Amino acid sequence: MNAPAPDPSIEELFERREDPDAREALVEHFGSLADALAERFVRSGAERDDARQTARLALVKAIDGFDAARGVRFSTYASHTILGELKRGRRDRSWDVRVPRALQERWLACARAREELTQSLQRPPTISEIAGALGTDEEDVLEALEAGRSHTIESLDRPIGSEAGAAVVGDRVGSPDPGFALSDRFAELAEPMAELDDRDRHILFLRFFEGRTQSEIGREVGVSQMHVSRLLRSALDRLREHVGAADVRR
């Protein structure tokens, strides 16, 4: 009776890592390392599965990228790779609004450069100085700093003050917009405005949207101030008639 074939060594498994069975064997062998590293990043039970999944995926990445010729032990190389992915994963989850990882990295680089320049210059650096320190464009710095505002977002439910029953942030945000009350009226005027000729519409726009005086309108349109007054009165009368008729229909 033939003796069973000995289990392949780790070196042999790496030589055959393109083989799914060899890859699975490597993941199984070093899985405890990935799980142990993941535990360092678990702050609650709900995070354990996510951390372990990130660590296992990083382990596969390490298996693919490992080169024994560099003289580094795989456990050392894998630990570095796994910890890097776990740190990036935690950083991704710390952003209240998800932005691309490359943009997150650029924001971190800008933040470090701004801190270092502030210390060396003894003043806050300009966008140009940050861009120069990083060897990038000012537009890239501005984009990264704008993205950094998404790192944390203040809750609208945060109380303002420590007293019981204090107002919350949401109570101080926004105010009634008087424009909403006029929206229906503007909708009603769309049809009669379309019936006016181009000059009358232009005069109404200059008077009520740009706040021009009748004299200024007359100079632009090429008529006298008195003629502008008559044109405005005529156009407004037609609009009032339409609005009045709409009120009656209601």
Image (cartoon, grey):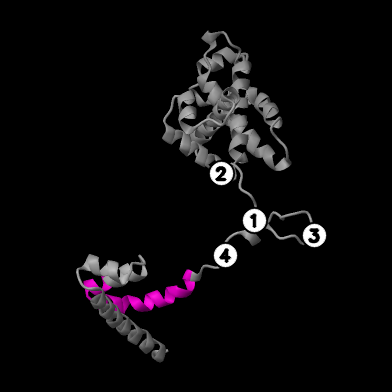
Q: Residues within 10 Å of mark 2 (few under 14, many from 20)?
A: some
Q: Which residues are magenta?
A: 179-202
Tag nearer the camera, 1 or 3 = 3
Q: Element type at marker 2?
A: loop
* The C terminus, quarter of image: bottom left
Whether residue 184 is in magenta: the answer is yes
Horizontal side of 163 relative to 8 (left or right) equals right
Q: Earlier in the sequence, mark 3 or mark 4?
A: 3
Disc sitting over residue 175 in the figure: 4
Instruction: Kindly identify the amino acid type of the residue bearing the numbered disc 1.
Output: Leu
Image quadrant in which you'd find residue 5: top right
Instruction: Kindly identify the amino acid type of the residue bearing the numbered disc 2.
Output: Ser
Q: Are circles 2 and 4 on residues that touch, CB within 8 Å?
A: no
Percent x, y of residue 76: 63, 16
Q: Earlier in the sequence, mark 4 or mark 1?
A: 1
Q: Are circles 4 and 1 on residues that touch, CB within 8 Å?
A: no
Percent x, y of residue 118: 58, 27
* Residue that label 3 marks: 164
Image quadrant in which you'd find residue 58: top right
Say which of 98 and 167 sits in front.
167
Q: Residues within 10 Å of mark 1 (few under 14, many from 20)?
A: few
* Residue that label 1 marks: 156
Q: Residues within 10 Å of mark 3 (few under 14, many from 20)?
A: few
Q: Are circles 1 and 3 on residues that touch, CB within 8 Å?
A: no
Q: Element type at marker 1?
A: loop
Task: Residue at 55%, 22% (x, y): give it.
Answer: 62
Horizontal side of 132 relative to 194 (left or right) equals right
Residue 22 visible at all: no
Task: Residue at 65%, 34% (x, y): give it.
Answer: 52
Instruction: Kindly identify the amino acid type of the residue bearing the numbered disc 3.
Output: Ala
